[in-house]
Amino acid sequence: MNREIIIGDRVRLIQRPQYFKTAEPMPMLRPPDLVVVGQEGIVVDRRPGGFWVVRFDSGAVLLDSQYLELVAMNSELLSKEEI
């Protein structure tokens, strides 16, 4: 998939950062085992510096796009199969 990430996309964590920064009004640094590699979340916001706010089951965190990959939606899979 060569599409850019946008708000509302479903993404998957492909690599753990050294730590996670929470996307709360008073951000905190959390350990890297907060989110498991392969876990999927929803992009809910874009922040300055190129960071994405992604909501996982364990909470919302700030992540750079290098740690994320887009998850193919059913409609995208169907259109590829039709070609």
Image (tube, rainbow, N blue to C red):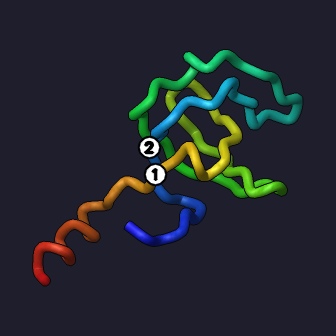
- Which of the two residues, 51 or 9, is positioned nearer the viewer here? 51
Residue 37 location, quadrant = top left
- Callout 1 amino acid: Glu
Mark 2 or mark 1, earlier in chain: 2
Question: What secondary structure is marked by label 2?
Answer: strand
Residue at the (37%, 53%) spot, across then down: 71
Residue at the (69%, 54%) spot, across then down: 45
- What is the spatial separation of the Cα atoms under label 2 and label 1, in whole angstroms? 5 Å
Question: What secondary structure is marked by label 1?
Answer: strand
- The percent position of residue 38, horizontal first and vertical second, equals 39, 34
Position above or below: 4 against 10:
below
Few, some or many C-alpha atoms within 10 Å of disc 1 (few <14, some 14-19, many ≥20)? some
Position above or below: 82 against 58:
below
Position above or below: 31 against 26:
above
- Which of the two residues, 76 or 1, is positioned nearer the viewer here? 1
Residue 40 location, quadrant = top left
Residue at the (21%, 66%) spot, across then down: 77
- Callout 2 amino acid: Arg
- The percent position of residue 8, horizontal first and vertical second, equals 53, 59
Report the side of 23 relative to 48 (left or right): left
| Residue position marked by numbered label 1 in the rendering | 69
Q: Quadrant of the N terminus?
A: bottom left
Q: Quadrant of the C terminus?
A: bottom left
CB atoms at circles 2 and 1 under 8 Å apart? yes
- The percent position of residue 55, horizontal first and vertical second, equals 58, 39
| Residue position marked by numbered label 2 in the rendering | 12
In this view, the residue farthest toward the bottom is 83
- Which of the two residues, 32 or 34, is positioned nearer the viewer here? 32
In the picture, the disc for residue 6 is none
Residue 25 location, quadrant = top right
